[in-house]
Amino acid sequence: MERALDVLEALERSETPLRLVDLCRLVDLHPATVLRSLAVLQRRGLVVAENQTYRLGVAVLRMAHGFLVNDQLTQQARPVMQSLTSVTGLTSSLYVRSGFERVLAVRVDGSPQLHYQVPIGRWFPLYVGSGKVIAAHLPKDERDAVAAMSEGCTNASGELLDPERVRRELEDIDRDGHSLTIGERDVAVAAAAVAVTGPTGEPLAALSVSGPSEHTSQDRLRQAVPELRRAASALSGRHSLS
């Protein structure tokens, strides 16, 4: 079962269908083992084979729907975010934590809309953009691990990330309680974010407001932070990662 999940995750992370040889390389398994896992996933409708490649099947969408309609945090977030967008005029987004990554679960569009709409379910690492408010709330060893993951990676403008600098940024965010980023994950996006936390203070999600970087100054983002904190406070303390 675990091997089948590894194969499923590899397909989920790929933006294009994968050949068997590529899947084997990504999951580091023998072709026969991967083929057995694929057969199980295909019977469940989770994987589809096309033109000697494999991609996710429609059953994955059913699973995603099940999450969206049953997860209390995302259900309670939408009206809070609608109010947040109404007050700030900015796009509100809720990124739910998944390990050392964040996944877009809810978005309420502001005006003007962003040129590029991140699709629901898209994931990003925690060391860049709004994900850093999640990383900043982690225990020090996990925070350091997130910073180390940035080694060799770049931001949206192609600038090489420095793990030590990321570590200092996380410390600053932990102190300030929010993050401000302009053109970091996407050169056209400026955003402010705060963490949504669980009953014991564990970071569950990042709640952000964002707008086109050409029209959204740091001052406007700072002015939105109090409303952002009120919205995050309305959602914090009610849920847990389980």
Image: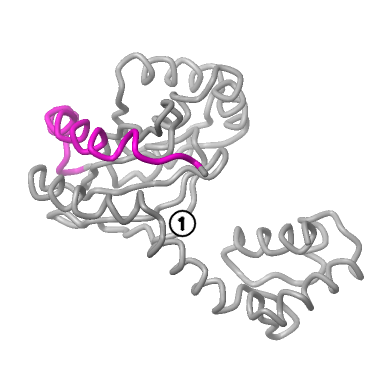
8 and 184: which is toward the camera: 8
Give the answer, above or below, for where 47 lies relative to 191: below
Is residue 229 highlighted in magenta? yes
98 and 115: which is toward the camera: 98
- Residue 98 percent location from the top left of the image: 53, 45
- Residue 81 percent location from the top left of the image: 21, 49
- Which residue lies at the image location 49% right of the left edge and 51% below the top edge? 123
For the stretch drawn in magenta, what is the main secondary structure?
A: helix
Q: Specify the farthest residue to the bottom.
A: 51
Q: Is residue 28 left or right of residue 42?
A: right
Three-letter residue code for mark 1: Arg
Is residue 45 highlighted in magenta? no
Give the answer, above or below, for where 159 lies relative to 4: above
- Residue 102 percent location from the top left of the image: 47, 45
- Residue 47 percent location from the top left of the image: 66, 76
Q: Which span is picked out in magenta? A: 214-241
Give the answer, above or below, for where 201 lies relative to 171: below
